[in-house]
Image (spheres, rainbow, N blue to C red):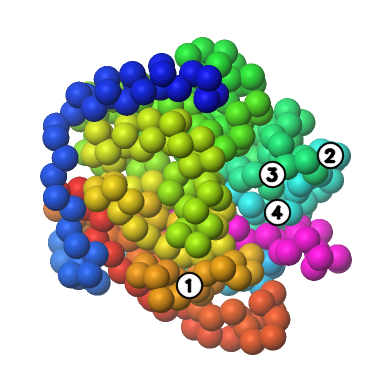
Amino acid sequence: MRLHRSAVVLLLIAATSAIVMSCGDTKNAATAPTLDPNGIAYSFVVLGCNRLAATETLGVASSANVQELNRTFADVAALSPKPNFLFMDGDLVLGYTNDSTNLDKELQAWIALYKASPLATSGVELVTIPGNHETDNLAKVAYAPGERTWLRDMAPYITRGGNGPGAGGADALQTDQSKLTYSFDYKDAHFVTLNTDPVGADWHVPVYWVAEDIAAARARGQKHVFAIGHKPAYPYPTVPTDGLVFDPVSRNAFWNILQSNQVEAMFSAHNHVGYHSQPTGHTWMVIAGNGGTPIDASVDPTIPGTGTWFGYTLVTVTNSGRVFSKSYGRDAPAGNYAGAPTDATTMRDSTEITWK
């Protein structure tokens, strides 16, 4: 989506607003209980940004924070009840290369870590979503070899893909995005996974396709909708331009689609922090970018909803339809963020994100 199409996108905002019922009130996070009183129908985990800093990857084939990644894999595998999905939400590896063979080596090493972990045989389905470090070159621009390498290496973990937008279309995409941005139903939920840096349209999602896809899911009777993409629509407050707001017209169109369809939340990473908020009073923005990359220096722990620990976000949907987002974490090892974790992983925050 380009800025020169802003007028058309604004028309989309108005049209999408009429798709479903009017918005209701969302439960105040400050009063949300920390337990699920009705039993869990299903659950999923989201996290991103586990890669090491660029200066610290020497000798680490995957370029991942291996100690934190292994701990998270083990923690998620040990959850009871087990989550149905683990969404790895981008920046799994350092990437940022003009040579896609280097990206391939990092991704293959990351996959080897996963296959050696207890998570691989736990029954939790792994779904991988690309971040800018996987799709971008040294100039920090998405390039086709990066997309192709990701699709080839991660094929076992994007098996539900295929229904996303192809090249061209209303969103004027330069490359086939059908397995990079796509959706699927699970029980009464609809999941929309988003490539937030398609070739030729960095910092954007295909809003026309998203509008049609979510409207169709609602028409089928899916009760819950969750969007998951690497870059947040609304970034962390101390880095206000580091997200899809790079193009505010397109971002606003996208967010209006989510709110008009009563989407509970968008989950993202990219900002190296745990954070949740309701930017416009309804749909939640949950940033789970605290997977093991050093927490951003600009993070302000006094901002409500901020988490400065390493870990993951667990989302549970109860049998009565209530939805909870819980941040689990542990402090980074003192003096060496990539060292072996010494703290137990505990629930650090719980927020009800049910659409009311």
Q: Amino acid at mark 2?
A: Asn
Residue range (magenta): 43-64
Gap between marks 2 and 1 measured at Cα: 34 Å
Image-based side of 72 in relation to 185, left or right: right
Q: Amino acid at mark 4?
A: Val
Picture residue at 19% right of the left edge, 62% below the top = 28
Gap between marks 2 and 3 measured at Cα: 11 Å
Secondary structure found at label 1: loop
Q: Amino acid at mark 1?
A: Asp
Q: Nearer the viewer, mark 1 or mark 4?
A: 1
Q: Amino acid at mark 3?
A: Glu
Q: Using a 10 Å C-alpha cutoff, classify the residue at mark 4 as few (fewer than 14 neighbours), some (14 to 19) or many (20 or more).
A: many
Q: Earlier in the sequence, mark 2 or mark 1?
A: 2
Q: Which residue is mark 1?
A: 300
Gap between marks 3 and 4 measured at Cα: 7 Å
The location of residue 76, given as percent across then percent down, is 48, 65
- Between 89 and 197, the one nearer to me in the picture: 197
Q: Which residue is mark 2?
A: 98
Give the main secondary structure, helix, strand or loop, of the magenta stretch. loop
Picture residue at 18% right of the left edge, 28% below the top = 20
Q: Earlier in the sequence, mark 4 or mark 2?
A: 4
Q: Are marks 1 and 3 in contact (CB under 8 Å)?
A: no
Picture residue at 22% right of the left edge, 70% below the top = 30
Q: Which residue is mark 3?
A: 134
Picture residue at 38% right of the left edge, 35% below the top = 252
The location of residue 77, given as percent across then percent down, is 49, 64
Q: Using a 10 Å C-alpha cutoff, classify the residue at mark 3 as few (fewer than 14 neighbours), some (14 to 19) or many (20 or more).
A: many
The location of residue 208, given as percent across then percent down, is 42, 21
Q: Earlier in the sequence, mark 3 or mark 4?
A: 4
Image-based side of 217 in relation to 109, left or right: left
